[in-house]
Image (cartoon, helix red, strand yellow):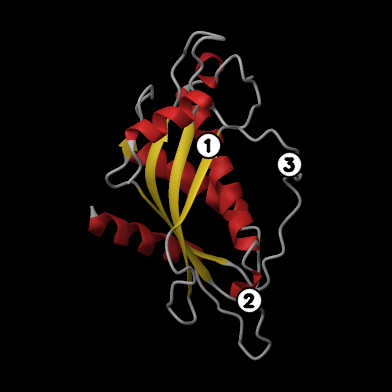
Amino acid sequence: MVSARFIAVLALVGLVSCGARAPETERAELGDFRLGYNIVQARDVERGPFSRAATAAELTGAIEAAVERRLARYDGDGLYHIGVAIAAYVLAQPGLPVIYTPRSVLFLDVNVYDNATGQRLNSEPHRITVFEGMRNATPIIGSGLVRGKDEQLANLAEEGARAIEAWLARNPDWFVPDPASPRVEFDREALDARAQAAISALE
């Protein structure tokens, strides 16, 4: 649960990291990681104050696509499933430059599962908080003035997928290749269809 007050403070303060990013062509070292299920849920999502509205389908679609783009690049012999629960979001509305420039923010709870064992690798859901990148925006002019809702959400989803990748890279022990284990074969389209069916059954 994310308090509305906490969301509001973060959205207004806009603690955005402006450090240099690795080029999109660079990849982290993820051992035998290969993306299996990519499941994103948007149940009981909190819409923060000062936020434009987004549907559950818009939220999940953007994040699923971003995670797919970033993590499907890896082609290890293992198979790992990613589960993401969207906890809360703010898609900033236009404000008043200098005086009031709310920032867009996204809260995610992430789990990763090993297909070989069926076990969750992280002991507790990993909380990720991301802000939009600063492209086409400045600390004085908030993104609500220069970006539409779809672009804000796409940028947040991209930052969220990047943060998930970085978290996985900080846990290399999860993805140590085992030469004795054969490569796990699967049909991605069939896997995605089963994932969507499972999500629909929960709704």
Residue at 33% x, 38% y: name it. Answer: 3
Mark number displayed over residue 21: 3
User: Which residue, given by chain and number where applicable, does mark 2 sit on?
Assistant: 77
Q: Residues within 10 Å of mark 2 (few under 14, many from 20)?
A: some
Residue at 55% x, 9% y: name it. Answer: 97
Q: What residue type is labelled 2?
A: Asp
Q: Which amino acid does label 1 sit on?
A: Leu
Residue 65 image point, x, y percent: 51, 46
- Labels 3 and 2: the sequence-earlier one: 3
Q: Do the residues labelled 1 and 2 touch (CB within 8 Å)?
A: no
Mark number displayed over residue 100: none
Q: Are marks 3 and 2 in contact (CB under 8 Å)?
A: no
Q: Which amino acid does label 3 sit on?
A: Arg
Distance Cα–Cα, label 3 vs label 2: 28 Å
Residue at 55% x, 18% y: name it. Answer: 142
- Labels 1 and 2: the sequence-earlier one: 2
- Of residue 163 and residue 185, the one placed in the foreground of this image is 163
Among the 4 quarters of the image, the one containing residue 6: top left
User: Which residue, given by chain and number where applicable, does mark 1 sit on?
Assistant: 156
Residue 15 image point, x, y percent: 57, 32
Distance Cα–Cα, label 1 vs label 2: 30 Å
Q: Nearer the viewer, mark 1 or mark 2?
A: 1
Element type at mark 1: helix
Q: How crowded is mark 3: few (under 14 residues within 10 Å), some or many (20 or more)?
A: few
Among the 4 quarters of the image, the one containing residue 9: top left
Q: Is residue 55 visible in the rendered structure shown here?
A: no
In the image, 21: left or right of 116?
A: right
